[in-house]
Amino acid sequence: MTRMVELPLWLLVLILAFATVTFASHFLFPSVRWFFRRRMERAVARLNKRLTRPIEPFKLTRRFDTVQRLSYDPEIAQAIADHCAETGEPEQVAFERVQRYAREIVPRFSAFAYFSFGIRIAKWISRAFYRVRLGAFDGAHLEAVDQDATVVFVMNHRSNMDYVLVTWLAAERSHLSYAVGEWARVWPLRSLIRSMGAYFIRRRSRNALYRKVLARYVQMATEGGVTQAIFPEGGLSLTGEVGPPKLGLLSYITAGYVPGKSRDVVFIPVAMNYDRVLEDRVLVAAGIQGQRKFRLRWRYILRHVGMHLGQRLTGRFHRFGYASVSFGTPLSLGDFMACQPRDTGADLAEPLAQEIMQRIRKVVPVLPVPVVAAILLERDGLDRPAVTARFKALVKDMEARGAHIHMPRSGRAGPDRVLRMGWLSSHPAAEAAGNTVGCSPSAAPPVAVTEQPGRFAIANHLQTDAFRLFFLALHGISKG
């Protein structure tokens, strides 16, 4: 027992390493985790005092616990049994697949990452590229929302800047949990987005087992009071128009709602509009091709990043105009269901989605560039005084019909500012010759392609012949 044993140095180091890891995992790590978790809980308690809607305990639950709860949910167990009966797959294999789906969906929320890092970055990016303005905002309606209700912000999807913009503007009210598509499941975005509380979804998946796991997670989060943000259009708008809704997430929420038992769900319509979106050329090209394939190459990205940095360094950079966010009238799911015929059954998601999208369209902000784009699509080759006169007429007409207008401090400077700053004429499809402004004949299609998203973003506020001109342009038919 007391005999000396000789060991190679590498083996001694390996034994000491294993001993250190074992000691830490059994004695040190639990204490350290407990210490930091207590500090985190106290920090969250202080944070909740200044938030309108505090962070719910569901978001603070350990990710492992949420994954296990989701995997062993009775409805998931029944879905596994049905799947195995249909396909002949062993239940253990199907269960492991369910756990993989759950780990893929469930986020790893960090209050520190969201409120200390994420909000500051979102604010900096938003103000670096846009003049951010708050449009329609009825504080009384928003403050009247039941504190025990789950709030779901439902938004139109104009740009990937939507996530950044709304995250910053809602920072004083609550944390937002987003549904994010496959594009963000790449390193290093995956870990960052998970820490911000977002969850990944496979938008094109038709796998019934995956859809059931996703549905149960959304229903658990909704019942847990998690404030969510969803884009029912299911993707970026290619034309700027508020498109038809897809019922996926909304149908999961309505399917899990039991009147009189479930926590009420309040949907808050959010409408966003931009003078110019960062992805305008890519979206327009996809719209012309008639397919949602965004051919974005690294060479294209690096070239534009280099141009942007050069403009920043030389002082030639001008922000992309205004970005505005409006909030519509909240809609309670309980009140909506009470007003519906009793025989609607599973079709409740469809009328609910249509009502929410209509409320979004009503509060879409009207900005200078979309108005000028509408004028150029309506009639080409106008001189600047004519553009200014038509600009005033359109703005006055939209104001009379209740549209929320945001213009420069001097309303008369609106079209001149748009043209002078190059927000429209800098695009390859628009040109200004002397005192005349029009669409470049060399552009394809013949009407300025970058005007289409801008003009159609306010289509629901306009009553002009530009609808006809838009579709002619979209199909490459000459206006003459």
Image (tube, rainbow, N blue to C red):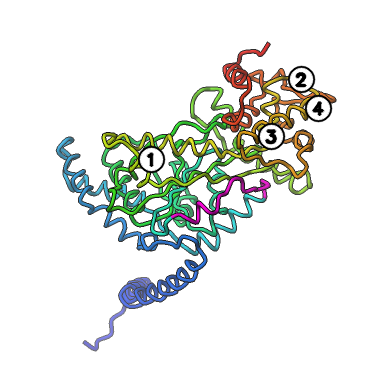
- The disc, 1 or 2, on the residue closer to the chain's N-terminal end is 1
Q: Which mark is residue 202?
A: 1
Tell me which corner region of the image, top left, top right, bottom left or bottom right, holds residue 13.
bottom left
The residues bearing labels 3 and 2 have C-alpha atoms spaced at a distance of 17 Å
In the picture of the structure, the residue carrying the numbered disc 3 is 369
The residues bearing labels 3 and 4 have C-alpha atoms spaced at a distance of 14 Å
The residues bearing labels 1 and 2 have C-alpha atoms spaced at a distance of 46 Å
In the picture of the structure, the residue carrying the numbered disc 4 is 384
Mark 2 belongs to which amino acid?
A: Gly
x 57%, y 45%: residue: 326
Q: Pointer 4 and pointer 2: residues touching (CB < 8 Å)?
A: no
* Mark 4 burial class by Cα count in 10 Å: few <14, some 14-19, many 20+: some
Q: Which mark is residue 381?
A: 2
The residues bearing labels 3 and 1 have C-alpha atoms spaced at a distance of 35 Å
The residues bearing labels 1 and 4 have C-alpha atoms spaced at a distance of 48 Å
Mark 3 belongs to which amino acid?
A: Val
What SS does tag 3 mark? Answer: helix
Tell me which corner region of the image, top left, top right, bottom left or bottom right, holds residue 397.
top right
Residue 245, percent from left and from top: 43, 34
The residues bearing labels 4 and 2 have C-alpha atoms spaced at a distance of 10 Å
x 64%, y 20%: residue: 444
Tell me which corner region of the image, top left, top right, bottom left or bottom right, holds residue 476.
top right
The magenta stretch is 128-145
Residue 61 located left or right of residue 273: left
Residue 229, percent from left and from top: 46, 48
Residue 439 inside the magenta-drawn segment:
no
